[in-house]
Image (spheres, rainbow, N blue to C red):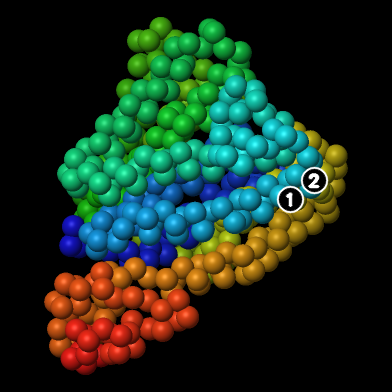
Amino acid sequence: MQNISRERVPELDGIRAIACLLVLWVHIGPQSFQPPSVLAAGSTGVDLFFVLSGFLITRILFYNRANKIPLSNFMVKRAARIFPVAYLGLALGLFIRPSPEIIYSAIYLQNFAAIFDWGRHVVCTHYWTLAIEEQFYLVVPFIVMLMPTVWAKRMLGAICIACVVSVYVVSYFAANMDRLTLDLAISGGTTTRGWLLLAGSLISCVERQIREDLYFPSITIAMLFVISTIFVSPSFYLLGLQDPTPWFAGPSGFGDGMIRRQLIVLALFIFCLSIPGRRSLTILRDPLLGYIGSRSYGLYVYHILVFEIFGVRRGLIMSESTLMVCLALLFTLVVAELSYRLVEMPIMRIFATAKSGTEAAREIAEKPGNLCPELCSMHAAKIRVDPMGSSPRSLCKGDNAQFRTFRV
């Protein structure tokens, strides 16, 4: 695991931005703004979000594991990144349309609330995606951080396959469910949709091969397309079920068509990371996409609320005005920008300075001229970070006598 890196991949900001824009596009109500149905824009955007999240989170977890950064460090940082904006969005949602059913969004069970009709009509229905991601955090970090590396990867693969099978298990009981419940159970279930997070995790396990090898990503992409066109559909018929959707998405975008679409999304994601993809898709490094990508979390959380205020939310259309749509989009961007600057960035700065002893020790060990990096690693746990902002360098010079011989 020594070669694990957290090197920034600029293409990922572009992917995140495209995913966010697709979701915003499909949630605009007026018919003249609706995307072509063949794109399945909203579903494709969510698929990209899930794959990207699984990839990035598992990448961080393996890096933390290799560098002996505790699991608690990861959990605290993720909570600080996710909860403030999410609960601010819920507070705004209560102000816009109060409902006791919003509790399911608050405790990250909105996907189950939708499936079982506990809360299908709350303002924050889009929190079902955040719920699935939080449920992912209850399992994957413990697998990656606590199991032997080889077994952790095998376990992720086994759970991913089991989750894909769960799509067909749920479909098998289609006769006992109404169409809407079936749609929600397949497209919003923890396992039936969350398998994409695990797929992203598996991609992170072979990131080096994808980013540096010419043949590995090409073979993987070809296999995904073959599976999507040959094996998925026949399996549906072997179970005695009808294929509910066309080849890519279809009217409701679930079942067989959903898996085909998701396999294609996985193939496109891998291509974006590969050498040919990085050379040809330079637009993913565009500064504008990077800007949108960095604000995508706020854009996702707040857009539904803003669209409802302006009367252009899909399903609750009160205005067909192009002007209102433009104003809603502009206001969404403004709210997301304010959230980014006043909420997200300050919190990220706090946790950027609150490094673990291991992280602080590594920074010192990597400084040019350090006389004893081994000692730094050996006593990493003894290094303290002053909450008032003292640097690891000053602490090593003064607070711990064992480090006084360091030349940093």
Q: Are marks 1 and 2 in contact (CB under 8 Å)?
A: yes
Question: Where's residue 124, x and y in %?
Answer: 67, 41
Figure quadrant of the N terminus: bottom left
Nearer the observer, 119 or 71: 71
Residue found at x 85% / y 42%? 319
User: Mark 2 = which residue?
Assistant: 96
In this rendering, is residue 169 above or below 275?
A: above
The quadrant in which residue 167 appears is top left
Question: Where's residue 38, x and y in %?
Answer: 57, 34
Residue found at x 30% / y 50%? 204
Residue found at x 54% / y 43%? 130
- The answer to whether residue 121 of the structure is visible from this angle is yes
In this rendering, is residue 267 above or below 390?
A: above
User: Mark 1 = which residue?
Assistant: 92
Q: Residues within 10 Å of mark 2 (few under 14, many from 20)?
A: some
The quadrant in which residue 62 appears is bottom left
